[in-house]
Image (cartoon, rainbow, N blue to C red):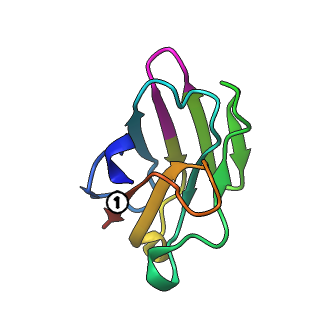
């Protein structure tokens, strides 16, 4: 599933700063919900930290925001006020079907 979503595999965040992550996706996925999560058992995401609503409107929840750009086939996740507990693996991707969700994994250090 990783072929449909690309982005950084590892990033270094500055404590207290903002982390900005950009991910690209293939044409045809513009109206899919994009999400960002912490993967759990078997690298599955059971709950999303944040997700788009299939539009290009910025969605904000707590310290995290996400915005989709249909024309550029990309979406951006911003994490404000980075703390030590934010370190670890994250997954982003597109909700497609129950069993197949194109995903990309990024390690935040």
Q: Answer with left or right where residue 76 lies relative to residue 21.
A: right
Which residue is label 1 attached to? 106
Q: Position of residue 88 (x, y in %)?
A: 39, 73
Looking at the image, which residue is at 30% across and 67% down? 109
Residue 45 vertical position relative to residue 11 in the rendered view, above or below? below
Q: Position of residue 3 (x, y in %)?
A: 32, 45
Q: Quadrant of the N terminus?
A: bottom left
Residue 69 shows in the view: yes
Q: Magenta stretch: give its range.
A: 69-76
Q: Answer with left or right where residue 59 lies relative to residue 40.
A: right
Q: Answer with left or right where residue 107 lies relative to residue 60.
A: left
Residue 13 vertical position relative to residue 86 in the rendered view, above or below? above
Looking at the image, which residue is at 46% across and 51% down? 102
Q: Position of residue 104 (x, y in %)?
A: 38, 55
Q: Residues within 10 Å of mark 1 (few under 14, many from 20)?
A: some
Q: Position of residue 38 (x, y in %)?
A: 52, 70
SS state under label 1: strand
Q: Give the total of numbered labels.
A: 1
Res 70 quadrant in image: top right
């Amino acid at each position: 599933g990783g072929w449909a979503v690309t982005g950084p595999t590892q990033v270094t965040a500055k404590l207290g700063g903002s982390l900005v992550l950009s991910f690209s996706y293939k044409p045809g996925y513009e109206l899919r919900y994009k999400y960002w999560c912490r993967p759990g058992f078997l690298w599955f995401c059971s709950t999303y930290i944040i997700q788009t609503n299939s539009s290009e409107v910025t969605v904000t929840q707590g310290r995290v925001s996400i915005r989709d750009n249909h024309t550029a086939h990309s979406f951006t996740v911003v994490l404000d006020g980075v703390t030590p507990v934010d370190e670890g693996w994250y997954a982003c991707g597109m909700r497609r079907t129950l069993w197949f969700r194109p995903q990309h994994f990024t390690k935040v250090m």
